[in-house]
């Protein structure tokens, strides 16, 4: 039985890698392309085919998708952790685990889910984040104008924040002259609008933070193409090749997991060509 170092020497320097003949290439292309061009269809068929041909476990690491949203859910998973469940309009379902900022109230998760599902269906995460940011800027401008008006009328003053956690740019509005407010319906309306804007801005800041985290969250998905469930890598080998999108950017990896004494000369070109076919179909 060769040692792992012996196998590495063999694979790196002594192995003569074979090649696939035209009929084998055509068979791979036909089998993968025969199930449609959706991401999940292509990857599922590719891993099943590799599994069948190699008699090992086919596996693939798929890219995170940014398709139009049908539903999104933020669920608190543990202190400092949240699960984002993203359902695309194309029927794909993806789970992403994110690290949440300290001090983020638990109510933010349900509020974010409700807000996004009610208003932003059919948009991607990037589009949703951009639209909320635009609303945020508009509300900040309105808040600045109303605050300046209230201060100019002598109904309020701006003070530096006493909370050390607040940034120096954040001002605290202190309302005074309550007797004057009683005489001015317009002033009361302005103050109430300012309070509403403060709440909206705080909520949308939290939304943008959550969307940014969801965008960057760990979205790895594993497709098992065989009933041979080898979850432990002890005593196993992986032959894997990257596949790229239309721009040549590597977006995932496809391969075979099996015992160390694999038929490397046969499996290496098989995996390599399958990755190229997958990349071409997805592009």
Image (cartoon, rainbow, N blue to C red):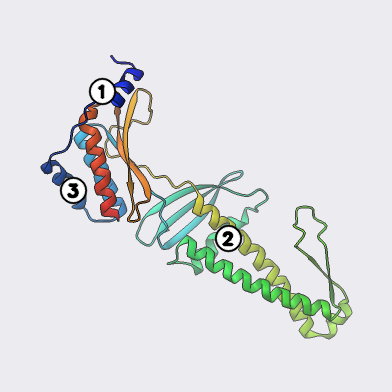
Spatial separation of the CA atoms under disc 3 and disc 2: 42 Å
In the picture of the structure, the residue carrying the numbered disc 1 is 14
Spatial separation of the CA atoms under disc 1 and disc 2: 54 Å
Q: Earlier in the sequence, mark 1 or mark 2?
A: 1
Q: Earlier in the sequence, mark 3 or mark 2?
A: 3
- Left or right: residue 126 versus residue 134 is left
In terms of depth relative to the viewer, which is nearer, 46 or 72? 46
The C terminus, quarter of image:
bottom left
Q: Earlier in the sequence, mark 3 or mark 1?
A: 1
In terms of depth relative to the viewer, which is nearer, 172 or 83? 172
Query: Badge 2 local density, few (<14 within 10 Å), some, or many (20+)?
Result: many
Q: Position of residue 98 (x, y in %)?
A: 54, 47
- Left or right: residue 44 versus residue 219 is left
Query: Badge 1 local density, few (<14 within 10 Å), some, or many (20+)?
Result: few
Query: Badge 3 local density, few (<14 within 10 Å), some, or many (20+)?
Result: some
Q: Which element type, helix, strand or loop, lies under badge 3? A: helix
In the rendered image, is residue 62 in sight? no
- Left or right: residue 238 versus residue 15 is right
Position above or below: 8 against 101: above
Position above or below: 17 against 105: above
The N terminus, quarter of image:
top left
In the rendered image, is residue 252 in sight? yes
Q: Nearer the viewer, mark 3 or mark 1?
A: 1
| Residue 28 found in image quarter | top left
Q: Which element type, helix, strand or loop, lies under badge 2? A: helix
Q: Which element type, helix, strand or loop, lies under badge 1? A: helix
Q: Position of residue 250 (x, y in %)?
A: 37, 48
In the picture of the structure, the residue carrying the numbered disc 2 is 208
| Residue 10 found in image quarter | top left
In the picture of the structure, the residue carrying the numbered disc 3 is 29
Q: Residue at x 45, y 66 (%)?
A: 123
């Amino acid at each position: 039985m060769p040692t792992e170092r012996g196998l590495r020497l063999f694979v790196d320097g002594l192995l003569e890698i074979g090649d696939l003949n035209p009929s084998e290439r055509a068979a791979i292309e036909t089998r993968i392309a025969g199930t449609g061009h959706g991401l999940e269809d292509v990857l599922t068929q590719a891993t099943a085919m590799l599994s069948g041909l190699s008699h090992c476990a086919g596996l693939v690491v798929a890219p995170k998708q940014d398709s139009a949203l049908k539903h999104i859910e933020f669920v608190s998973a543990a202190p400092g952790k949240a699960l984002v469940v993203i359902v695309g309009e194309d029927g794909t379902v993806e789970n992403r685990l994110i690290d949440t900022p300290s001090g983020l109230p638990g109510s933010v998760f349900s509020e974010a889910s409700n807000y996004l599902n009610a208003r932003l269906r059919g948009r991607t995460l990037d589009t949703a984040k951009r639209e909320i940011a635009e609303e945020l800027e508009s509300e900040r401008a309105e808040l600045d104008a109303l605050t300046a008006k209230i201060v100019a009328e002598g109904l309020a003053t701006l003070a530096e924040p006493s909370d050390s956690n607040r940034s120096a740019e954040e001002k605290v509005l202190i309302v005074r002259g309550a007797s004057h407010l009683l005489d001015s319906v317009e002033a009361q309306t302005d103050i109430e609008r300012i309070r509403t804007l403060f709440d909206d801005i705080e909520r949308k800041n939290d939304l943008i933070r959550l969307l940014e985290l969801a965008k960057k969250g760990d979205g790895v998905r594993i497709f098992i193409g065989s009933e041979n469930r080898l979850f432990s890598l002890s005593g196993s080998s992986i032959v894997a090749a990257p596949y790229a999108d239309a721009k040549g950017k590597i977006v995932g990896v496809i391969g075979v997991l099996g015992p160390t004494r694999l038929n490397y000369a046969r499996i290496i070109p098989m995996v390599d060509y399958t990755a190229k076919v997958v990349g071409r179909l997805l592009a």
